[in-house]
Amino acid sequence: MPCPLLVLELPHPNRKLGDPAALMTDRAYDNLKSAEIKLKFSLKSASPDPTAMTPENTRHCSFTARLDCRYLVHAPGAIDDRTLLVATLHGFSANPEAMLRLTAGMMGPRHVIAAVQGPNQFFLSQGSQEVGYGWATHKHPDSSVRLHHDMLLHVLNEAGREYGIPASRRILAGFSQPVGMNYRFAATHPGEIRGVIGICGGIPRNWEEGPYHPVTAAVLHIARREDEFYKPEVTERYAERLRLRAADVEFHMLDGGHRFPSKARPIADAWLERIMAPLD
């Protein structure tokens, strides 16, 4: 809607004597007339421009493009019926090389480990050549979740076929950012994995009411008491929340901050022994 113009009633210097306006000098009249012109111009300039760019006349478009995704694989010298395939996902700003080493320390040397690289790359600081990777932001989360699922399905099936490891012997692990996404995967694609390990991460916000299936995979969640990102007063309720969809949930709260726990190996060994015993 155009702004209303403010019209000033200007006295003319030729009015008859006795009119107060007649006391105005020619210079004062000229100044007031000039002010009126400037005011009219300013008000006209403030009117909406129909050609201006606004959220209402801007259209958002999207398209699908090819993306080269990467993962690292470490396999033992010999593969037998007890060998597992562990797909592992690093945290925000980390990399698959570091996650491969950390996961190998937790799972032991007898398993195939596939460390998947996050699809989003960025420099860790200004002027640095060091690169980190991530999985998602709050912008377009549905696209990030879909890409995460597609990547995992590819890695699990490709590496599983290569090493002859069926879905019943496949484990999904993650640290920090991808933990919640991994739980989404387990609840969206039941039967693709035997177990899921979440370390220092979260649970999907829509876990209770989201469009998920019952989780057939066993769940192992490890939290830290001094975690500055996933506070213990929140994570201590995770076991209860996870059991809304998963029948087999094991939860551990360890001392320490937001770091991959060095004492995770005994916990993982005992958990694997329990959940894999019916298959061995």
Image (spheres, rainbow, N blue to C red):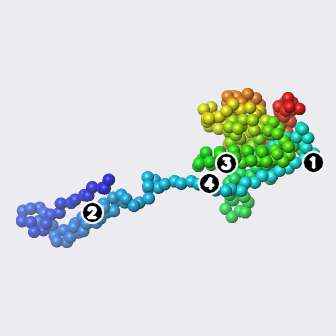
* Residue where numbered disc 3 is placed: 147
- Contact between marks 3 and 1 (CB within 8 A): the answer is no
Whether residue 172 is visible to the viewer of this picture, yes or no, is: yes
* Residue where numbered disc 1 is placed: 77
Mark nearer the N terminus (3 vs 2)? 2
Any mark on residue 64, and which?
A: 4
* Residue where numbered disc 2 is placed: 40
Q: Quadrant of the C terminus?
A: top right
Viewer-side residue, 231 vs 133: 133
Mark nearer the N terminus (4 vs 1)? 4
Give the residue at x 78% y 45%: 157
Badge 4: how crowded within 10 Å, few (<14), some, or many (20+)? few
Q: Position of residue 216 (x, y in %)?
A: 74, 32
Give the residue at x 24% y 68%: 34
Give the Cα separation between the discs numbered 4 and 1: 40 Å
Q: Amino acid at mark 2?
A: Lys
Q: Amino acid at mark 3?
A: Leu
Mark nearer the N terminus (3 vs 1)? 1
Mark 4 lies on a secondary structure that is loop
Mark nearer the N terminus (4 vs 3)? 4
Give the Cα separation between the discs numbered 4 and 2: 51 Å
